[in-house]
Amino acid sequence: MSYDYKNIETKWAEAWAAQNAFYCDTHDFSKPKYYVLDMFPYPSGQGLHVGHPEGYTASDIVARMKRMQGFNVLHPMGWDAFGLPAEQFAIKNNVHPEVFTRKNIENFKKQINALGFSYDWSKEVATIDVDYYKWTQWIFLQLYAHDLAYVSNIPVNYCPELGTVLANEEVVDGKSEVGGFPVIRMPMRQWVLKITEYADRLAEDLDELNWPKSTLEMQRNWIGRSEGVAITFQIEDHKESFQVFTTRVDTLFGCTYCCLAPEHPLVSTLASAEQKEAVEAYVKAASAKSDLARTGTEKEKTGVYLGVHAINPINGKSIPVYVADYVLGSYGSGAVMAVPAHDERDYAFAKKHGLEMIQVLEGDISENAFTGDAKHIHSDFADGLNIADAKLAITKKLVEMGAGDRVINYKLRDWIFSRQRYWGEPIPMVTLEDGTEFPIPEDQLPITLPEMDKYQPSSGGKPPLAMAPSSWLDYVTPDGREGTRETNTMPQWAGSCWYYIRYIDPHNPDAICDEKLLKHWLPVDLYIGGAEHAVLHLLYARFWHKFLYDIGVVGCKEPFQRLFHQGMILGENGEKMSKSRGNVVNPDEIIASHGADSLRLFEMFAGPLNEVKPWSTTGLDGAHRFIERVYRLIDEPSFASKISDENSKELDYSYNFLVKKVTADFEDLAFNTAIAQMMVFINDCYKAKSLYRPYIEGFVQMFSCICPFVGQEMWARLGHEELLTYVAWPKCDEAKLVKDEVKIPVSVNGKTRNVLLLPADSSEEEVKAAALNDERVKPFLEGKEIKKVIYVKGRILNIVVA
RNA sequence: GCGGGCGUGGCGGAAUGGCAGACGCGAUAGACUUAGGAUCUAUUGGGCAACCGUGGAGGUUCGAGUCCUCUCGCCCGCACCA
């Protein structure tokens, strides 16, 4: 019998399902808990791609190890099931999006089970389940009750093609992240969540997390905390004043003009009679431009003089005020003080408009603005100071004068939370006849989606639900007031903001999760998923978690203690997998041709988990070969007969080193090196005269974390009836790692000349003597003066000669 | 431009400051075979050698792929955030 992966995989998949092998009793607190979570997938019509099993295999290996190590392991899977593709499919084919989505979920689940992941399916959740989104709506009501959800008529990113509004995070280069359609700015009525209220904590608490550095940085950049000074500029001969924000208050003496953003509320008020026409034309043109057309460092710096001057509070200098679209209305106060000598943008603008420049730091400004640190000049009391000291001095002065104060600004904007879509959670709000908002009482949740004939939004941004039957739209409050239900739905991010909470207690009808369970199981110990969620999902989820912490629902400040991103798997040609490139690998085909275990092994062995790595057909063959090589050890009589209960000395070191290495590497998610060591052990087994049964069993056990089907099969063939799930993890016998003899490389001036095999307990003197008398070392010492001998115990001996 | 990451054989990749290239892929030779795209054995960074080799140039150190400075190249984010 050779390695019959098809039968083996079918057999054990059935056995696991029949025995409910991976059930986690979350109420059992007798063992330490371990919560290992995958980012749940959007169940697309395409099914799994080879990228999915990469992260899932990694988390599965850890889950399997932790169970064997005596942890109560929660390892759930679910579905991020609201989403645009299902809605678009529904529009096209005129079927309910849920029908399409449920079918995809079924397919995904089948594929996932074929890969042997040890999920506890009793914890399965889908964001489209009524029992689930009831609680998504509940959280929204709590946010509303705590003044963190509000309606705004702000200009939003509207995508005509998709017929919906998008969050800033969903717009990339002026196009929709999904589909790549153009996005325009227009004011619309939207629900917005006050994520900015949490900006400081979202930034600060990043320090406590075991997350990839790059992701921490991306979140910090996105939040964009920046400390500076807000300064008030009085308009000359006018009652109005405006505020600017600067991080370079030290350059205030070099300010020669100010700029307001076109959106700034004072622009039309301040414009002089002569300039009014030109200013209004400019503002109109600017607002018609998309963000993409306006922003970009290389864009020409245009602007128009308002016809008024302002007073620089630090020196009383009269300076012109401009409107310019290089100033963003959405950041700071929408106005800046311009210091052309020391800011590149101001420099470009001043050159173009022939404006005055005052240099206030020593440096060359003949070609470009000088932005480095130097001594201040032309700055009165700040002369001679560097940037940091000048900032302190000038800020102090401004505060004394009442003309400025320290402030902290964030790039983070509030989260536009409504979508003009059908296939999302209805927002549990009502607009009463008098125009006021009315939150639907909790006991009336869930607000389910109505059945509809059509799912597309109407032109002009009216959501599909606006066309719902009046039986759905009309609402009467418990005290008899009439109103209309909110017809916007929530964005897809809503459901994924808290699914890790629901997994713990997924069928609880009374709360989002039992309180005691929540406190026990959170935070998630290990979270694995793609780096594409570094900002969006992970920031929103942290925001909701912090809110739930504030209202006493969860007991910890952060949801995901340790985060890891699996790297992308490229096509065999090193390019991103895509249909158009024709390099897409389908996991179903690999399972059919090589088996799920081979696919898992290959993906884990291909390289470090976090790196981008190309697919390799020969590498997959290699993985398959290794499994066969392992399998033969148990399956082929000539090898199997070598397995005995008598200790086989030959493998003592190899095995115990393996246990140590695999245990540590699995913990570090360094699966490629763990597998390399397994290969070394198997090579040693092939060389060994006899195989000590406990070593073979220990190996099979560790191997089964990576290749669970064939691992369990071998376990059974070794005479065990039980599943491997809770068999105690192998232990490393440190005593067996101590060698009688050690290899000591001897180098002369850093170049290795020989390697000596010496008793492990050799003293420094003995090692030195052996080295100095060594025939292969001697020639390099002849006629030279030995200046120094460095001995690092058990590692190396270096002789320094002149 | 700013931030983060990475440059090691023909390829994927190993190396707590201590024998660079573990392990695998590929390749070469041989064995067993009717056969071999199965399996096993051996070899496999370059060079005849001394030696030379971790993108390049310096530096620290007894000793550097690893630490420091500069530089080149690639990948990923952000990008007029004042």
Image (tube, coloured by chain):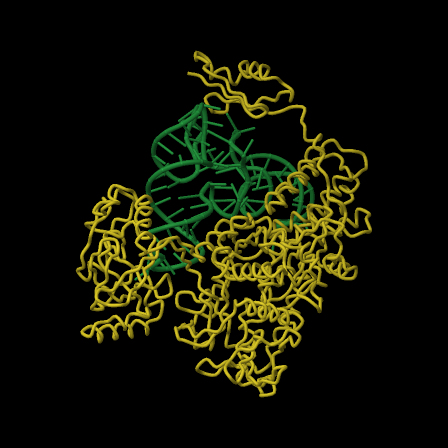
Chain colours: A yellow, B green
Q: Nearer the viewer, residue A283 or A334?
A: A334
> In the rendered image of this protein, does residue A509 appear above or below residue A398?
below
- The image quarter containing residue A285 is bottom left
Left or right of A657 in this view: B18: left
Left or right of B70 in this view: A44: right
> In the rendered image of this protein, does residue A96 appear above or below residue A715?
below
Residue A63 location in percent, x, y? 68, 52
Q: Nearer the viewer, residue A454 or A570?
A: A454
- The image quarter containing residue A126 is bottom right
Residue A84 location in percent, x, y? 53, 73
Residue A222 location in percent, x, y? 44, 58
Q: Nearer the viewer, residue A724 or A134?
A: A134
Q: Residue at x 58, y 54 (%)?
A: A557
Image label count: 0
Q: Nearer the viewer, residue B74 or A138?
A: A138
Left or right of A687 in this view: A393: left
Quadrant placement of the C terminus of chain A? top left
Left or right of A27 in this view: A437: left
> In the rendered image of this protein, does residue A164 appear above or below residue A70?
below
Q: Residue furthest bottom?
A: A470
